[in-house]
Image: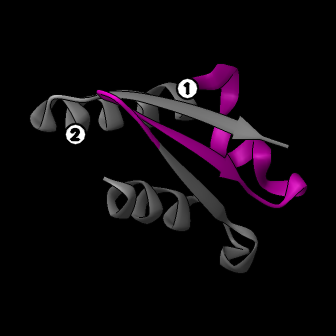
Amino acid sequence: MKKVLETIIFNIVDNKDAVVIIEELKDNAVSFKIKVDPTEIGKIIGKQGKNAKAIRTLMKAAGSKEGKKVLLEIVD
């Protein structure tokens, strides 16, 4: 699942070197913390949060295939 998230994020941002994705496994859940360059947080969140919502939807669909709950957090 991390590869899917990396692919999505890398295609949105310009500065790919500043992207850090931290994966934490807890019981039946996977938590991802996404850190990007502060100037590109707006690209990840999108207008009115539409990009972030779409990314969460895709990741929840990927997680349901594996029977896991997926949480995404965009960190400054």
Residue 71 horizontal/vertical position (percent) = 48, 28
Asked whether 67 or 59 is in front, the reply is 67
- The local crowd at label 1, few if under 14, some if 14 to 19, many if 20 or more residues have their Cα within 10 Å, is few
Mark identifier at residue 73: none
Asked if the residue at tag 1 contacts the one at tag 2, i.e. Cβ–Cβ closer than 8 Å, the answer is no
Which one is earlier in the sequence, the residue at label 2 or at label 1?
1
Residue 22 horizontal/vertical position (percent) = 59, 54
Q: Quadrant of residue 44?
A: top right
The residue under the point 79% across, 54% down is 40
- Reading the image, the residue beneath label 1 is 50
Nearer to us of marks 2 and 1 is 2
User: Which portion, as a residue range, is magenta?
Assistant: 25-50
Q: Is residue 45 left or right of residue 6?
A: right
Q: Locate the C terminus by quadrant.
A: top right
Residue type, label 2: Ala
Residue type, label 1: Lys
- Reading the image, the residue beneath label 2 is 62
On screen, residue 53 above or below 19: above
Cα separation between marks 2 and 1: 18 Å
Residue 6 horizontal/vertical position (percent) = 46, 63
